[in-house]
Amino acid sequence: MTSTLVELTRDLVSIPSHDDAAVAGDFLEGWLRRETDADVTRDDAGNVIARKGTGAETLALVGHHDVVEPAPSQVADGSDDTEATEYVVDERDGRLYGRGTADMKGALAAALLAFREADPAGELVFASFVGEEVGGVGAQYAIERGFAPDYAVVGEGSTNYSGPDVTDVAVAHKGRRGSTITARGTAAHASEADAGENAIYRATAAVDRVRDLEPPSVGVTGETLEGRLTVTEIEGGSAMNVVPARCEFTVDERTVPGERAALESVADLEGIEWMVDQDLPPMRCDDDAFADAVLEAATAAQTADPELVTKPHATDAGWLSQAGTECVIYGPSEPGEAHTDDESVSIEVLERCLETYRRVAREWPTTR
């Protein structure tokens, strides 16, 4: 089975899917139709969804087949050509190297094989979304059109969180809200500064308001998940001798389940406008039985002792959780592997994920 998992991962990783994920979607759809008797659909966004089994409750194995832009070394001809027809995939020292190995086509390959082999306890779904790397557009599209599994295992990275050589079960992660705050004033010549209203001064007051806000925190599985507010960019003014009429800055906000910082209060200041540019929701699993069941399967699939952990960044699990799906994250990617020029994944950990997905698909939902 190892060679099958490695070969399937290699096949998926070799397909470029940073600008357009259609060919990778073609591969997934074709494989599912050939290798399974599942009901396979491909929606207008490009999401690939397959269903098998019956039952009152639905479990989904979820991933995405888009990736971020590769480095030149990850393209077959070693060029900067964004129209590359193939990505490089190398195997050495027990790892597969290439764009998408860790994030997250290795996990997709494991989920495909587990889905094919499963005789599920209820309805089992395989779902691979597009557009995760640009804010979860595929997941949102599917959810808006009725995609609503009761439970989901999302194959994003959860390896080496509690310690080395262990694949943990993440039961919560932060979200991200990105905002632009614009200060408006009235231009004037700097020699007659009192004739104008200085937008930079107003922006400074707004920055102070942001810095004074208390980000919320929540306790999850013995850990504290802490929010954060960070001013990240600022731009304003037109010339050294002109009182600026406009100044703009951005705020990166890491959100936690259930609470938000009162960032909207900056708009109470004179001359200040607040606009949300991106809002990726956080995730928290509130079904202890499901989290424990996945943890039990993960423990049986490895010699280490995995734990329930949290992740610092957003995934498609946030969109699913917001829509009512109980989610956990379990996947091979390790901290620092995704989006790198030497991205890689451990073959041993891929096997571990495959075995865990098999066990969860076979045993959940349980009769409760």
Image (cartoon, grey):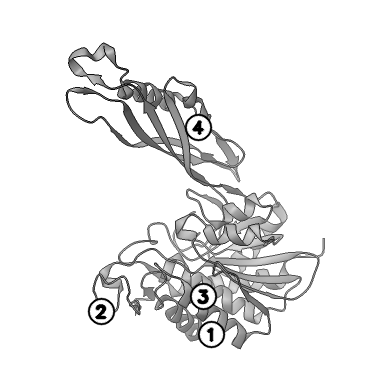
Q: Do tag 4 and tag 1 residues touch (Cβ < 8 Å)?
A: no
Residue 28 occupies quadrant: bottom right
Q: Quadrant of the C terminus?
A: bottom right
Name the one closer to the observer, 270 or 264.
Answer: 270
First of labels 3, 4 by sequence position: 3
Query: x and y percent of residue 134 in the render?
Result: 45, 57
Real-space Cα distance between discs 4 and 2?
A: 47 Å
Question: Which dot marks residue 77?
Answer: 2
Query: Mark 4 belongs to which amino acid?
Result: Pro
Q: Do tag 3 and tag 4 residues touch (Cβ < 8 Å)?
A: no
Question: Which dot marks residue 215?
Answer: 4
The residue carrying pointer 4 sits among few (fewer than 14), some (14 to 19) or many (20 or more) residues within 10 Å by Cα, namely: many
Residue 337 appears in view? yes
Q: Is residue 272 above or below residue 289?
A: above
Q: Is residue 62 above or below residue 209?
A: below
Q: Nearer the viewer, mark 1 or mark 2?
A: 2
Question: Which dot marks residue 113?
Answer: none
First of labels 4, 2 by sequence position: 2
Real-space Cα distance between discs 2 and 3?
A: 23 Å
Query: Mark 2 belongs to which amino acid?
Result: Asp
Q: Is residue 11 above or below residue 125?
A: below
Real-space Cα distance between discs 1 and 2?
A: 31 Å
Residue at (48%, 48%) from the top-left corner? Answer: 312
Residue holding disc 1: 1
Secondary structure found at label 2: loop
Q: Nearer the viewer, mark 3 or mark 4?
A: 3
Secondary structure found at label 1: loop
The residue carrying pointer 2 sits among few (fewer than 14), some (14 to 19) or many (20 or more) residues within 10 Å by Cα, namely: some
Query: Mark 3 belongs to which amino acid?
Result: Gly
Residue holding disc 3: 25
Residue 295 appears in view? no
Query: x and y percent of residue 224 in the render?
Result: 54, 39
